[in-house]
Amino acid sequence: MNLELKNSYRLLNHGPTTVITSAHAGKRNIMAAAWVCALDFNPAKVTVVIDSKTYTRELIEAEGTFAINLPCVQQIEMVKQVGSISGRDLAGTDKFADYGIDTFAAQAISAPLVKGCVGWLECKIIPEPHNLNTYDLFIAEVVAAHADERMFSGGRWHFDGQDDLRTIHHIAGGVFFATGQPC
C-alpha cells in the first residue's frame, strides 16, 4: 500500500530498528540502523545517522538516495547479520546474495527494497554538509512510502495478532524487543 507522504512519518514514530539499502553504479549494500527519525511532514523528511566509514554511506553519497526498510520479528537474524559486517569487508561479494535477502525495485530511487519488511521509505538526500561532516547526520526527503496493509492501515500500525510481523527495536548490546501491545 502506498502512503501519502505527509503521513510517512508514522512509519518511524514508534522507533523501530531499520535496515538501510543503497545502490550506485551496479553496486548495492544493506546495513542495520537504529538512529533513524522522522523530521517533518510536508515535504516529508527524515534523519539518519550513518558512520563515515561504512560502505553504505559511500554508495548513498555517490547516488544521493537510499531506502529505509522496516524489518519485522521474522527477519531478526537478517538484521543481526547485515548489522555485524561491512559490505566493504566482503571483498566484492554482495550481502543480499550472501544472506539470501530477497528484494524488489523501489518506485523512485535505485536502492532495492527488502521483501518481507512491513514498511519502506524511499529517500533523496538534502545536502547539509555541516551536519553530515560533523555528526554523520543525513537529512533526506521521503519521495515514496509504502507499508504492508496487514500491519499498517488507516494511518496507523496494527500490531495485534501478528507477532511475527511486529517491528523490532534495538535497545543496545545486541538485544532486541518486538513492538508490544497498545495501552
Image (tube, grey):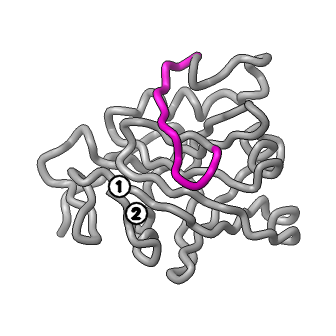
The part of the image, by quadrant, that contains residue 15 is bottom left
Sequence-earlier tag: 2 or 1 = 2
At 56% from the left and 65% from the top, the residue drawn is 143
* Residue extent of the magenta highlight: 98-110
Image disc number at residue 147:
1
Q: Where does residue 9 sit, x and y in percent of width and height?
A: 45, 71
Q: Is residue 49 left or right of residue 127?
A: left
Q: Circle 1 — which element?
A: strand
Magenta residue check for 86: no
Tell me if label 2 and label 1 are in contact, CB under 8 Å. yes
**Three-letter amino acid code of the residue under disc 1:** Ala
Q: Report crowding for label 2: few under 14, some 14 to 19, many 20 or more residues within 10 A (C-alpha).
A: many
Which is nearer the eye, 15 or 99?
99
Which is nearer the eye, 83 or 143?
143
> Which SS type dominates the magenta stretch?
loop
Badge nearest the viewer, 2 or 1: 1
- Quadrant location, the N terminus: bottom left
Which is nearer the eye, 168 or 173?
168
Q: Report crowding for label 1: few under 14, some 14 to 19, many 20 or more residues within 10 A (C-alpha).
A: many
At 87% from the left and 71% from the top, the residue drawn is 130
- Quadrant location, the C terminus: bottom left
Q: Where does residue 105 sit, x and y in percent of width and height?
A: 52, 40
Which is nearer the eye, 68 or 2?
2
Magenta residue check for 102: yes
Residue pointed to by mark 2: 11
Q: Is residue 157 left or right of residue 21?
A: left
**Three-letter amino acid code of the residue under disc 2:** Leu
